Image (cartoon, grey):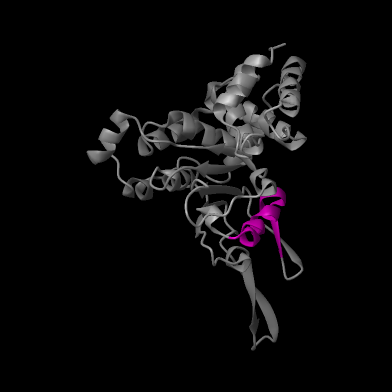
């Protein structure tokens, strides 16, 4: 693969890392998620940079951006849109909601009720919404980046498994390292930096990059390895249930994107291992406490499954 095919996106990664300091692994995972055509869930405490990461990616990729602040009284119509009656035309006119954007930031998604959360299901799976009996296509490309606070915080509703499964990846940002936090405190990077960021790509270029990711070669031996990992999650005594076939397809797409970002034209087992925690943890539930799987459990799983 020619490195020139992914150099423009490397510039996006570099610029994003200049805004969100000290988080190169997380920004790369988020980028791989979008390149794979998936939706991203970012879970962490308030003030850790979740919104900054989402807004930075939207700006750098030249995507039309909309943000919804999820609250307990938010209604599905606040997301999808509403029809109003126009007397002069004696007809209803549909006013699109913020979901009709290329990148939708669903901020603090778990503060809304399950009914409101479910308004995103059709959009995330089918790229369309149905309102007043009429189906309307969403812009292309269409991504949801959702942020959520830890479930133990006051005023949160847990995301149902059907909603979690729509997210290709879930990542956590965590506290910055000492050097990155010092640069932040010294004022080298501010929140306003995101607003001044110029697009490095545009929405028309992104589908071509996604198509290039899909052309990354996957060998039969790599598929054997991926199947072995899926089977291991289904037989693991610590998990209530294993990964679904949809999760397997997502894992393969994410591994392709990870390999492409390295400038390679084939997927290696290392690529699968790199993205597996982000793809699997939020889909697996522990038999002990019903919580999402911990990355260390995934690391243990990787040690148990031999590479063909």
Q: Is residue 290 magenta?
A: no
Q: Residue furthest front?
A: 288
Expressed as whole percent of the image width and height from the top left, the position of residue 53 reads 44, 42
Above or below: residue 277 compared with residue 94: above
Figure quadrant of the C terminus: top right
Q: Relative to 80, say whether 245 is above or below.
A: above
Asked whether 129 falls inside the magenta stretch, the response is yes
**Residue 145 position within the rendered picture, expressed as x and y whole percent measured from the top left:** 54, 47
Q: Is residue 171 visible?
A: yes
* Residue at left offset 64%, top offset 88%: 88
Q: Nearer the viewer, residue 296 or 51?
A: 296
Residue 208's spot in the image, x, y percent? 62, 37
Tell me if I can see residue 8 in this picture.
no
Tell me which segment is drawn in magenta. Answer: 113-130
* 4 on left or right of 160: left
Give the percent coordinates (x, y) of residue 8: 49, 32
The residue at the point 60 percent across, 59 percent down is 100
In the image, residue 139 above or below residue 249: below
Using the image as rendered, state which of residue 278 and residue 141 is in the foreground.
278
Q: Is residue 12 left or right of residue 226?
A: left
- At horizontal 64% and vertical 84% (from top left) the residue drawn is 86
């Amino acid at each position: 693969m020619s490195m020139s095919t992914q150099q423009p996106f490397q510039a996006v990664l570099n610029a994003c890392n200049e805004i969100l300091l000290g988080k190169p692994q997380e920004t790369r995972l988020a980028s791989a998620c979008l390149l794979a055509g998936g939706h991203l869930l970012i879970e962490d405490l308030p003030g850790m940079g979740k919104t900054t990461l989402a807004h930075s990616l939207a700006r750098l990729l030249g995507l039309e951006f909309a943000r919804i602040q999820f609250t307990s009284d938010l209604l599905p119509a606040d997301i999808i849109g509403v029809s109003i009656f126009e007397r002069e035309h004696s007809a209803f006119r549909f006013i699109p909601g913020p979901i009709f954007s290329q990148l939708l930031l669903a901020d603090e998604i778990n503060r809304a009720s399950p009914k409101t959360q479910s308004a995103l299901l059709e959009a995330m799976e089918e790229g369309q919404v149905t309102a007043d009996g009429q189906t309307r296509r969403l812009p292309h490309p269409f991504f949801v980046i959702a942020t959520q606070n830890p479930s133990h915080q006051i005023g949160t509703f847990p995301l149902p498994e059907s909603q979690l499964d729509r997210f290709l990846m879930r990542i956590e940002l965590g506290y910055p390292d000492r050097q990155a936090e010092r640069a932040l405190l010294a004022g080298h990077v501010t929140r306003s930096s995101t607003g001044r960021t110029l697009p490095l790509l545009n929405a028309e270029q992104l589908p071509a990059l996604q198509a290039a990711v899909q052309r990354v070669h996957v060998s039969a031996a790599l598929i054997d390895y991926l199947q072995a990992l899926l089977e291991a999650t289904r037989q693991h005594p610590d998990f209530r249930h294993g990964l679904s076939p949809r999760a397997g397809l997502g894992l393969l797409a994410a591994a392709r994107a990870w390999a492409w970002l390295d400038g390679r034209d084939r997927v290696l087992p290392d690529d699968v291992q790199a993205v597996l925690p982000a793809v699997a943890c939020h889909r697996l539930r522990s038999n002990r406490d019903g919580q999402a799987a911990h990355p260390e459990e995934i690391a243990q799983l990787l040690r148990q499954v031999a590479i063909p």
